[in-house]
Amino acid sequence: MLAKTMQPVDAVIVGAGPVGSYTALRLAKLGVKTHVYEEHATVGLPSHCAGHISIRSLKALGYYPLPNGIVENTFSAANFYSPTGTRFALKLKVPVTLALNRAKFDQYLAQQAEAAGVTFHLGTRVQSLSLENGFVRGVYLQDGTRVPSKITVDTEGISSRLLRQTGLQALNPQGLVYAVETEIDGVTDVEEHAVEVYMGSSAPGFYGWLIPRSDGTAKLGLATNHGNPQAYLQRLIAKHPVASRQLKKAKIAKTSYHAISLGGPIGKAYANGFLAVGDVASQVKPTTGGGVIFGLTCGEIAAEVAKAALERDDVSGEILSLYQKRCNEALDFDVSFMLRLRRFLNSLSDERLDGVLRFCNRLSVDKALSDVEEIDFQGRMMLQVAAKPQMLAALAYFGLLYLSANH
């Protein structure tokens, strides 16, 4: 029995996360007939992300303010703790980040895309790519149905299952950390508009986080590059000198697990008839693990490059390579800085981390950073503050620590 073949479309997008829906929206606004395939029955569920996002970046993308119910809290402060409880408190002049209800945010983007003419197929798993003569010519669904398309955009997430079928090199597994994310109730002794960050051996290779809401609930999570994140989270709750106090009455309502890629974008995110965008291309901040803003930024680039290729009736890798070039121009400087910063943070023993936080307090580094609003493109942010005396001294000190740890 021959497999069923659907009517051809201009573009197929695999995955209805925020990056997939936003890329579809941009394509539709450019007049490209676009279909999105999502294996889950509901957009945004299950949610695997804390949704801690930069206000400035959302404004730049045209997504702030957002409709009621999507923003859970805004933040103008962050407290950074070593495993011994040493704290560096950063207070900013204005709210700089916010916490999203990720399911509602994802659904909002999908609704916008649908209103622009995008067709969504929910509960529909893409099984494989349709490959012909070295080109991706659409996808096969799990039931064997073939969906022909002129271009396929892979926003499947970190699994990289489809990307590997093109022969492209997937993200570096050595750059992965493994996260546990929980919803909790009964948080005490926290500032409503401050994020709590637990560093060092509390979460080796990354950090733990507590993102409060005004009603006493919060998002609590942790990621690590080795060991069981759930075990580290239980130890944080029970033994960390600060977190144990904040969480002594807390009850976990929901738990999820996911991986985060901190290794920087993959070297090549395009092939004949194919573009990879978002987590699948490791377009993620190596410092914080945030991928929404980088993914949306590259999704807009992908839509523009795809539209130009379709107009030329040439979706070869040679033409689509412009996507890689433009993404590199948008991200490379900041990613390079963040990769170095991630290596520096990972090199610190708990004792040295204590010293770094105390040094930052003595130097009043918080004052040098108090007017910062840019947190996604951190290389550019550092250029803005590096000339301040506190930051010059701090950067010199951090540089010496980094050199001593790597030689």
Image (cartoon, rainbow, N blue to C red):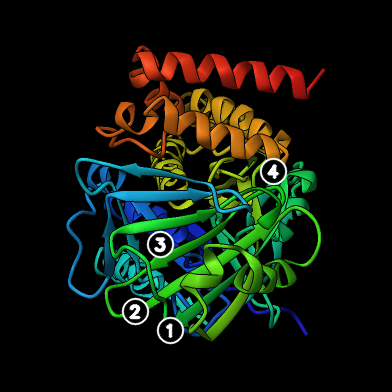
x then y, percent, for residue 124: 57, 80
Answer above or below: position of 36 versus 321.
below
- Let me know if residue 400 appears in the view: yes
x then y, percent, for residue 65: 17, 57
Mark 4 lies on a secondary structure that is helix
Mark 4, mark 3: which one is toward the viewer? 4
Quarter of the view holding residue 134: top right
State the quadrant of the N terminus. bottom right
- In the picture of the structure, the residue carrying the numbered disc 1 is 185
Tell me the crowding category of disc 3: few under 14, some 14 to 19, or many 20 or more residues within 10 angstroms, Cα based: many
x then y, percent, for residue 75: 29, 55
State the quadrant of the C terminus. top right
Task: Find the distance from the CA under tag 2 to the CA under tag 1.
Answer: 6 Å
For badge 2, the amino acid type reads Gly
- In the picture of the structure, the residue carrying the numbered disc 3 is 21
CB atoms of marks 4 and 2 within 8 Å = no
Mark 1 lies on a secondary structure that is strand
- Let me know if residue 123 appears in the view: no
Q: Residue at x 55, y 39 (%)?
A: 315
CB atoms of marks 1 and 4 within 8 Å = no
Tell me the crowding category of disc 4: few under 14, some 14 to 19, or many 20 or more residues within 10 angstroms, Cα based: some
Between disc 2 and disc 3, whose residue precedes? 3
For badge 3, the amino acid type reads Ser
Task: Find the distance from the CA under tag 4 to the CA under tag 2.
Answer: 30 Å
Task: Find the distance from the CA under tag 2 to the CA under tag 3.
Answer: 32 Å
Res. 350 mark: 4
- In the picture of the structure, the residue carrying the numbered disc 2 is 216
Tell me the crowding category of disc 1: few under 14, some 14 to 19, or many 20 or more residues within 10 angstroms, Cα based: some
